[in-house]
Image (cartoon, rainbow, N blue to C red):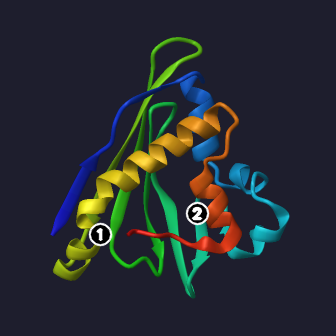
Amino acid sequence: MAEEVIGKSIILNQPSYAIYNIFSDFKRIESTLPQDKRDKVHFEEDSVLVKVQGFEIGAKIHNKVPFSLIELEQYGQAPFPFLISFHMEPLSDTQTCFHIELRAELNPMMKMFIGKRLPELVDKLTDGIAQAAIGNIPDDVKQYMNGQGINFS
């Protein structure tokens, strides 16, 4: 059963082309990871694989529309099929309206465990991108990078 989440819209003080350029080539993100964490993440231009609790979970670029849309789909051993869409609408030369949409195909068991948490996950990702756009690394990312893993509880 498909779950669809439309995340909150935020204003980023970055031009849409800058946001698009970061997410349209995962190799650009690689350099932002601490050196000691890079062995858990494998980047290609159009895909990323992350080792989490013995699994390789990943995303690959499914579709790109310059400066307005990037869609990512599951890649590797994802526990369920998904499509994440990053929407960017230029407001000016220096501001972009940004939001995330998620579509996930969840079986009844997965829906019971994480279905209600998907909106929170999308909003946390949105907040993290907002903080990264101003140069801050969110605490949740720091915890993950320190080996705490992903906690859905």
Residue visible at 64% across and 54% down in the picture: 26
* Residue type for callout 2: Ser
Badge number at residue 2? none
Residue visible at 57% across and 88% down in the picture: 54
Question: Is residue 78 visible in the rendered structure shown here?
Answer: yes
Taking 87 as reference, is 148 left or right? right
* Up-down relation of residue 124 to residue 81 (above or below): above
Looking at the picture, how far across and down is residue 134, in whole percent?
65, 31
Quarter of the figure that contains the N terminus? bottom left
* Residue type for callout 1: Ile
Looking at the picture, how far across and down is residue 81, in whole percent?
33, 71
Quarter of the figure that contains the C terminus? bottom left
Residue at image mark 2: 47
Question: Is residue 41 visible in the rendered structure shown here?
Answer: no
Residue visible at 69% across and 75% down in the picture: 40
Q: Disc 2 on helix, strand or loop?
A: strand
Q: Nearer the viewer, residue 136 or 97?
A: 136
Compute the Cα span from label 1 to label 2. 24 Å
Q: Residues within 10 Å of mark 2 (few under 14, many from 20)?
A: many
Residue at image mark 1: 114
Q: Residues within 10 Å of mark 1 (few under 14, many from 20)?
A: some
Taking 62 as reference, is 82 left or right? left
Residue visible at 76% across and 51% down in the picture: 32
Q: Quadrant of residue 83?
A: bottom left
Q: Quadrant of residue 51?
A: bottom right
Q: Quadrant of residue 93?
A: top right
Q: Nearer the viewer, mark 1 or mark 2?
A: 1
Looking at the picture, how far across and down is residue 90, in whole percent?
47, 20
